[in-house]
Image (tube, rainbow, N blue to C red):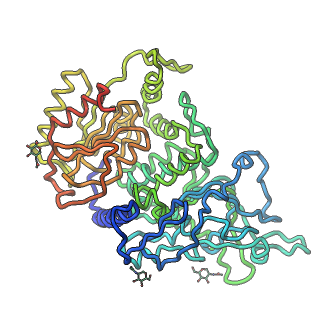
Amino acid sequence: MGGLPRTRSLRDVVLILLGATSMHLASVFMGFNEPTGSIIVKTEVSSHFVEDINNTVVAPPAEDRETSRERDVQKVLDPGKDTVDVSFQLPETTILSHAPGWTVFQNIYMANGTLYIVSSEPASSFPHTRMMTSTGLAAENTPENIAAREPTARDMDFLTPAEARRRWGGNSDKADRNRVWSVGGNTVLVNEPPQFLDHYYHFCAELMLGVWPFWLGTYNIQVDASAPSVEAAPHIDRMIFSHAEATGWRDRPGFNSYFLRAAFPSITVEVETDWKDRIAATATHGIPERAWHFDTLMLTDRSAAFRGESCGSRNQRIASEAVEHMEKRGTLSKWWWEPLRQAVLRFAGVDQETLEIGVKADAVAARKDGAEVDWAGSTSLSKPQPIVITYINRQGARRHLIDEDHQALVQALTAMCAAHSWELNIVQAEHLTHDEQLKLVARTTVLLGVHGNGLTHLIMMPVTPISTVIEIFYPEGYANDYKWTAHALGMKHFAIWNDTYHTYPDQLWPNYPEGFQGTQIPVYAPLIARIIQDRVAGRLP
Ligand SMILES: *[C@@H]1O[C@H](CO)[C@@H](O)[C@H](O)[C@H]1NC(C)=O
Ligand SMILES: *[C@@H]1O[C@H](CO)[C@@H](O)[C@H](O)[C@H]1NC(C)=O
Ligand SMILES: *[C@@H]1O[C@H](CO)[C@@H](O)[C@H](O)[C@H]1NC(C)=O
């Protein structure tokens, strides 16, 4: 949010194409259409994986390998247990957790740009490489591009311990050291081009909203709602953007770097040039070869996530694979997002009482006697939750409401809020600083606006039983971004088509009709006012 919307015609086209593919896949997958034979969707036995639409692309054997390699993470948390001197040993690779597009490895190696799994177990005992990685190319919906994103042995490969020793090992007779250098600590490797990364929604509400729950879930970190802390999880030491330069992971309004630094003040960032340095250092053009060893590495890959069923067929959100996997595994605690949300908001200057609106309202709602909740050391929730309505006004931006409908909406909201003594904010985000925007959204009960990046701020709203996101689309138009995100965080979402709305459990499919991006989006203000009043009164639970 902030800044005029950039002209992202390429991204929109790609989203439209991906949306169309996903919708087609979904309709085939859900059995709404008979497969025609030219488009083949293979579902693997009892697995979550859906093959890409072109079955001529590497078709691995049908078998669910996903969870078999997940190790007892408790072992990992034993201090000292896994500190191996790679000068003299090459510890074998294990996988701590894996979902399509999300994998946490221990002891993975990189040489000349290839990630190497070193194991005495066969490759078939690991997840398919295409569910972990890709060539990292930007996505287009052409058969050529889909094939070109399929990983090869250049991207990820397997070595037996003996092969690894032959390539990188020292001469043990002479007590030589291995030619392997360890990159210690915890690394997140983002194998994704700038195509989506340089966008607030895709970076914060998709990538980070997947990295964080996957990390917490891997180590089964249970968040303490009364004191949610980033420090309770193993430290994330660095992020490597192997296909994006310094500007490639930054959005124009500047929220991506703000968010990352606020949440992880001591994180180190490496970009494509740094990754190329690491590659060049190991590309020795002959014997002896060198390699990097990564202690613990989370690999995220957008294309691989889209090969999963949840992302590829249902949600089109890479984070959905990470979140659903950890939910199924039972290691994601209820307030998983709260540590990052509170860390970023505290950085923005939000006070403690405001930070706790969500967890306190939830605790009050959970108590039958309606008694106050008082965390140790903080103020009690003695007054009811303030009702704050925030309308993101996009009239100055490309995609926006019919002017008269915007005026009528402002009038209806103003009258409603005056009648109930609710706070109303009508904001053009580009006129507020980062801190101002976050301070506002930290108190917002209902966030409302035309489909657009401003709604990404929903990830900073307090999650209470009445928290609501209202997203206005051109009638019949739909995109899955904010609905999935709102639901993942426990908030209710309404998609508005002028005078009708859709909410869970209605299922809409992405659709970008003529007019979607235009300046003639209608909205019937009385409907919006009614939804807000019903939500606050608890009539639309
Ligand atoms: C599938 O991919 C192959 C090669 O990548 C290509 O020759 C073929 O035309 C594609 N088929 C379809 C249905 O897209
Ligand atoms: C390193 O990778 C490049 C391709 O990126 C390849 O051409 C080259 O032969 C490789 N070098 C070695 C030593 O394997
Ligand atoms: C929007 O809904 C209102 C109320 O039903 C209706 O009067 C108006 O014509 C609709 N606008 C469009 C563009 O459909």
Which image quarter holds the C terminus?
A: top left
Left or right of residue 22: residue 263:
right
Q: Position of residue 485 (x, y in %)?
A: 40, 46
Res 244 seen here: no
> 183 or 104, which lies in front?
104
Res 130 seen here: yes
> 433 or 525, which lies in front?
525
Q: Going 54% across and 73% down the picture, which residue do you hit?
A: 151
Q: Position of residue 25 (x, y in %)?
A: 38, 65
Q: Going 69% across and 53% down the picture, which residue do you hit?
A: 71
Q: Residue furthest bottom?
A: 286
In the rendered image, which quarter is residue 138 located in?
bottom left
Is 197 situated above or below 417? below
Is 368 situated above or below 22? above
Left or right of residue 425: residue 283:
right
Is 427 situated above or below 141? above
Q: Residue furthest right?
A: 173
Left or right of residue 306: residue 325:
right
In the rendered image, which quarter is residue 249 located in?
bottom left
Q: In which quarter of the image is ligand 2?
A: bottom right
In the rendered image, which quarter is residue 444 located in?
top left
Q: Position of residue 137 (x, y in %)?
A: 45, 71
Q: Where is residue 100 in the image (x, y as percent from the top left)?
A: 53, 60
